[in-house]
Every structure is written in C-alpha cells, then in structure tokens.
Image (spheres, helix red, strand yellow):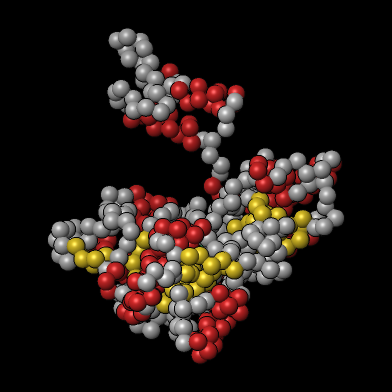
Amino acid sequence: MDGVTSQENRQARQRPVWVNPLFGVTDPASGITAVPPRRRLPEGPMTPSAVSRLIRDELMLDGNPRLNLATFVSTWMEPEAHALMGDTADRNLVDRDEYPATAELEQRCIPMLRHLWNAPDPDASLGTSTIGSSEACMLGGMALKRRWVHRNPDRYAAGARPNLVMGVNIQVCWKKFCNYWEVEPRLVPMEGDRFHLGAEEAAGQCDENTIGVVTVLGSTMDGSYEPVADICAALDALEERTGWSVPVHVDAASGGMIAPFLEPDLVWDFRLPRVASINVSGHKYGMVYPGLGWVLWRDREALPGDLVEHVNYLGGDVATFTLNFSRPGSQVVAQYYNFLRLGHEGFRQVQGALREVATHLARQIEGLGCFRLLTRGDQLPVFAFTTTDDVTRFNVYDVSRRLREWGWLVPAYTFPPNRQDLQVLRVVCRNGFSLDLADRLVDDLRGLLPWLRKQPGPMFGPEEGTSFHH
Ligand SMILES: *Cc1c(COP(=O)(O)O)cnc(C)c1O
C-alpha cells in the first residue's frame, strides 16, 4: 500500500471535514467556520443540527441497503418496529433487575424458539440471546469443549489437542472460535458437486479428541442445507464402532428461521438426540436489525454448569453465559415484536414469499443462457451461480462490477478447497426484496450482457472482487 495513492490518501485523511456554510456552524463573532478535523477529536462542540446534517451527507455514499443482495442481515423493518426500537434504545439488556420487562421479553422468546426447534423441554431456560450468531457459536463451541474436557480429564491434562469437525464452507466465526479457544479446526473440503459437509466425511474426521461436529443449515457459500440427520446417523454408527460419542452443534444462523416454517418435516433440530445446541441470527431471517443472535442447549448435560457465572451486583442473582456483558435491549424487543406480529402462519407466508422470489429469480437468471445455477434458492432463499463454460469474455467479477453501476450489490467470490476453480455470484433474498425488484435485476443483467460479451476478455479478478459477506 505504498506509493502515490497512499500518500494522497494520507493527506486526504488529514484534511478537515468540509462543512457547508449553510449548516450554520459559522461563529457570528469571528465569522470563522468551525471545521472539525477528520481523525482527531474536535477542539469544541458543534450544534446538533449541523453535526447531524454533516453525518447524513457522509452516509449518502453508502450503498442502498435494500439493493444489497450480499448480506443476510435485515435491511428492512416495519415503521412500528423502528419506533419501538428507538423508544427502547436506552435499555441495557444486562440490567435485568432494573428493566425486568425487557428481560421478561427475552425470557419469552427463548421458549418460543425452543418449541419451534422441538427441544425436549421447551420451558427450560437453557439458552440466551447474544449480539449475533458469532457470539452464539462461540458459546456453543465453548460448551462442546468444556464437555470434552470433563469427559477426558486425563487426556486433556496430558496435552491432547481437542478438535472440531466441520465443512470448509463454514462461516468465519468457527475459524475464530478454533483460533481463540485453541481447538484444532478439521475442515472437510468440497469435492465435486458436494459444496458442504457430507455425513461419511464428517464421521471420518472424528477421533477421541473431537469435541463435536458443526453442521450448517444452510451454507453461507450457496444457501444449501447440510444433511444434519445423515451426519447424526453417521456419528451414531461411529459411536457404535468406537465408543466415541460426538455431539453436534447446528449452526442454523439463517435456516433456523426458515426450515421450521417451510419444511416442518425436515428433521434437523432437537428431534435428533445427538443435536446438543443450535444457534440462529435474530438479525437474519428473524428479521430484526443487527445485532441479535440466539443459542439454545438441549438439556443441562449439554451446557456444563461451570460455564455459567452468577452476578449479584445489579441486585438479584443473575446467571449469565455470554461473552458480552452490556447489550442493547431494543433488538430483543424487536424480536418479540416480530414473533407476535407474524406468529407461525405469518412467518410461513413471509418466508414462503421469499423462497418464491428466490426460486423465480434463479430460474430467470438461468434462462439468460450464460449462467449455470449451483443452487436454486429452494432451501435458504439464497442461490449461487457461475458462468457457463462457453463464456470466455467476462467472468463473475465483471458481472458484479457492472451490476454495481445500477446500484445492485451482488458479491462474487471463489469457492474454498477443493473447488477453488469455481467462481460464483451469490444472491441473498431477504424481506423487502420483492418479485418486482427481482425482475428489475434480471432486466438490468440482461441489459449488461451485450456489453460484457463485447469485452476482449475478463477485466476483473478476485483481487478487485467485491467483498464476500456472510
Ligand atoms: C451469518 C452467519 C454466522 C455469523 O453470524 P452473525 O450473526 O453475523 O454474527 C455464522 N454462521 C452462519 C452459517 C452464518 O450464516
């Protein structure tokens, strides 16, 4: 990052923020406009109106969140939910004694989710809200590790290194978990048309030091569901052969709020005795603004008691198993709003409509003739596609770049081992993305093709590619 550009960038960073004189920050006495420095705390205050106009102007350069087909995270909520979140922005969720009503709403959401995921005892308070699935996954992973330590005190003391088995398509939070908590990640590579974890491959990676298997519903790479039940069955067979009992954590960051409504008969949740814990992102298909996640454990055995801390300095005895202490309460309020607002049938309709948009859009894109679908949007309302073999003059990165000119944010990226040869585009359909918008996207894509076909060859590569969002 050396050279002219970085020098120019450095100078730009040191220039003060430009302030429109209309904003009224000119000091009447001196006539001098107060210009806040860009990267230092300003000397003095500015008026609220000037600051807010200044910041709104800066934020104009963000992409339009509704046209952001890269993210899984909510970009639209009802005005009533907005208002509710604004009104509760002053609640700290951890102050349970001070805000018992907010705390109560969290304690209502947990059994709702436990019931939705068929936990044996829906009313057991074995779960917590988190700041997102990443924190939820850390907690799930820590419980797996601690259980393994309890079961293997001698091996642990002798320096055995615990490992966690998962597909290479795993979300980055699991790599962080393994890195931060010193667990060996055992990543099963993709092979051929298998773009996620397979049952035999998962069981094949396990040994006496395996703390668990993580399986994803659905994969951030292509929206596909991993075969959770088959993975559990393979681990049952492994246990019979070897005596190693390997628990499963289901990372249902997205699918946890899709599958129960659209595939009630798909058995992926606590109905499988081997499933010890499940997480979901409230801010993905739970349709709350970021950041909110949930994690639930099957039973007391799945959540070692020595991980739970008790604090009494807020008044009362509060049991906590989270990484963050203070957290916003308004996200939980908004989740409760969505639960009451939609109910089971409402969720079924909303998620069903999304799947219709996703499968429709996938078919339309396939119909353009130069793209091959890797998934069809019929599991998560998410699909990945690549260019057909006869396309030589442009690649997925060119498509992503060109779509951006129309405001569409569609990420392009390379698949992980052993399918690095596959370069894909991915579309995530979320609430707020309509059939009409989907048709607009297809029209824009169709309009780009003649230009792309005139290129002498691909113009962009992974280096300049748009970033991959989970
Ligand atoms: C998004 C995602 C995560 C991380 O979730 P955050 O809520 O963004 O922290 C983890 N796993 C999967 C499968 C995801 O899709």
> Which residue is at 50% across, 77% downward?
207
Residue for point 19% across, 62% down? 311
Quadrant hosting residue 435? bottom right
The image position of residue 279, as x and y in percent, is: 44, 68
Quadrant hosting residue 310 = bottom left
* 271 or 19, nearer to the observer: 271
Above or below for 242 versus 215: below
**Residue 315 visible in the shown view:** yes
Q: Which residue is at a point 61% across and 61% down the rendered structure image?
A: 221
Describe residue 431's horizontal placement relative to residue 191 as left or right: left
Task: Pick out the residue farthest to the top.
Answer: 30
Seen from this angle, which residue lies furthest front?
Answer: 158
Q: Is residue 433 toward the left or the right of residue 76 in the image?
A: right
| In the depicted structure, whether residue 182 falls above or below residue 26 | below
Number of numbered markers: 0
- Name above or below for residue 86 compared with residue 385: above
Q: Is residue 316 left or right of residue 455?
A: left
